[in-house]
Image: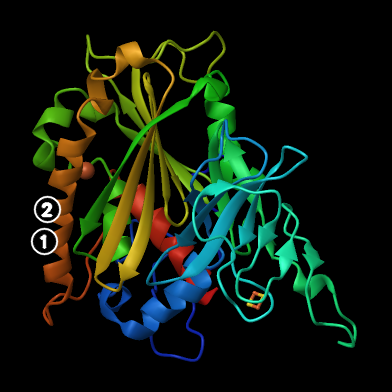
């Protein structure tokens, strides 16, 4: 459902002075106060109310066999949740807590293939779907085993071979992903092959990185190369309930999608679809494939951004708006790091939005206000 103004209640303060106070009307609204990026209390709230219930891009077990397990940690430094992806005997991939339900040892210590998951501390065993299977020396323990003795299984969803998991989602996966699935139903998601991953350390608060992503306003100023591929006048933003989309239209002669008959953008030369899934996932879709960005706070003023690329048409890599993502990223990082220095200034009090060019940023701030204080 595309809408000019998503139906959000106004933000309000909850037992504190701080309130994002972002007016629903962009023509009147002021951007959030700098405490959003600098206050430890706000950051603690972001952790519990924004990132704990978020959907996060997780590693993929696509193509891996029964019993394959891949441990990883979700948002080290902020969520610190050891998880493990496991393909069960039924062929289903699950995302499980990798913390033993006895005394919290990590169960799976490295990638590998298993018949069962066994904790090496005191020998507790779980089946590949995470269910408690066996524990020595527990005769006489009342009410044991119970549901609580199995490994927690997280909601997991997918876009083709790309997986997203959540510790306890605020938004249903179907609602979050629907705008992508509808707009890009024609794309060969099942043909995607994972190409590579790059991790960037950005010396700035995570929200500054997201804001920068959400507007094409800076493209002519910050990205000379990208500006040559995109038609700035046609660049536009569409808002959905918990996501938004920037449509990059190609300049004449630049690479674009071949859209099927009846597609809403048929007749236009679309160079890129930039989807943002609140709060921390970017799905950038190009004629060659998909570049996923996971924005992960590492600390209040440090952000790790993981770029994972998935390709469906190798022959088109290097064309158009998705050609040199590394150069564009470094240009973005430099400006975001500069903004981080600016928001620390006692003289900065927040600003105003361009109604024409910053609807995505305003939408993000409204969603953030709702998640933090709604
Ligand atoms: S902590 Fe795993 S069996 Fe004791
Ligand atoms: Fe940029």
Question: Would you call the spot at circle 2 few (<14 residues within 10 Å), some (14-19), or many (20 or more)?
Answer: some
Question: Would you call the spot at circle 1 few (<14 residues within 10 Å), some (14-19), or many (20 or more)?
Answer: few
Q: How far from the left and from the top, in percent, is residue 87?
A: 66, 43
**Closest to the observer, 215 or 327:** 327
For label 1, the SS is: helix
Q: How far from the left and from the top, in percent, is residue 81?
A: 51, 68
- For the point 72% across and 45% down, the residue is 88
From the image, tell me which residue sits under label 2: 334
Q: How far from the left and from the top, in percent, is residue 242?
A: 53, 52
Q: Quadrant of ligand 1?
A: bottom right
CB contact under 8 Å: marks 1 and 2: yes
Among the 4 quarters of the image, the one containing residue 40: bottom left
For label 2, the SS is: helix
Q: Is residue 19 visible?
A: no
Reply above or below: 361 against 252: below
C-alpha distance separating marks 1 and 2: 6 Å
- For the point 52% across and 56% down, the residue is 71
From the image, tell me which residue sits under label 1: 338
**Closest to the observer, 98 or 111:** 111
- For the point 37% across and 39% down, the residue is 308
């Amino acid at each position: 459902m595309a809408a000019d103004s998503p139906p959000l209640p106004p933000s309000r303060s909850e037992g504190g002075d701080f309130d994002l106070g972002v007016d629903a009307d962009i023509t009147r609204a002021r951007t959030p106060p700098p405490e959003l990026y600098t206050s430890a209390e706000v950051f603690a709230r972001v952790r519990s109310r924004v990132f704990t219930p978020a959907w996060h891009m997780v590693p993929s077990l696509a193509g891996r066999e029964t019993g394959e397990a891949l441990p990883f940690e979700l948002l080290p430094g902020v969520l610190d949740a050891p998880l493990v992806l496991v393909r069960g005997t039924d062929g289903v991939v699950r995302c499980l807590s990798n913390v033993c339900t006895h005394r919290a040892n990590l169960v799976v210590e490295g990638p590998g293939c298993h018949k069962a998951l066994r904790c090496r501390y005191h020998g507790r065993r779980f089946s590949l779907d995470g269910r408690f299977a066996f524990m020595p020396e527990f005769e006489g323990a009342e009410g044991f085993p119970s549901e609580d003795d199995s490994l927690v299984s997280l909601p997991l969803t997918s876009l083709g071979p790309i997986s997203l998991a959540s510790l306890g989602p605020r938004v249903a996966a179907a609602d979050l992903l629907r705008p992508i699935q509808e707009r890009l139903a024609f794309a060969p998601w099942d043909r995607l092959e994972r190409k590579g991953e790059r991790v960037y350390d950005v010396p700035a608060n995570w929200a500054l990185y997201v804001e920068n992503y959400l507007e094409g306003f800076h493209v002519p100023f910050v990205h000379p190369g990208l500006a040559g591929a995109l038609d700035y006048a046609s660049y536009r933003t569409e808002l959905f309930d918990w996501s938004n989309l920037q449509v990059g239209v190609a300049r004449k002669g630049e690479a674009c999608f071949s859209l099927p008959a009846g597609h809403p953008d048929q007749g236009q030369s679309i160079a890129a679809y930039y989807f943002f899934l609140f709060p921390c996932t970017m799905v950038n879709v190009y004629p060659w494939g998909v570049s996923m960005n996971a924005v992960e706070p590492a600390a209040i003023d440090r952000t790790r951004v993981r770029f994972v690329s998935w390709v469906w048409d190798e022959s088109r890599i290097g064309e158009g708006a998705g050609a040199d993502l590394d150069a564009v990223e470094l240009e973005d990082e430099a400006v975001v790091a500069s903004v981080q220095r600016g928001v620390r200034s006692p003289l900065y009090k927040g600003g105003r939005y361009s109604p024409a060019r910053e609807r995505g940023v305003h939408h993000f701030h409204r969603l953030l206000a709702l998640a933090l204080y709604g």
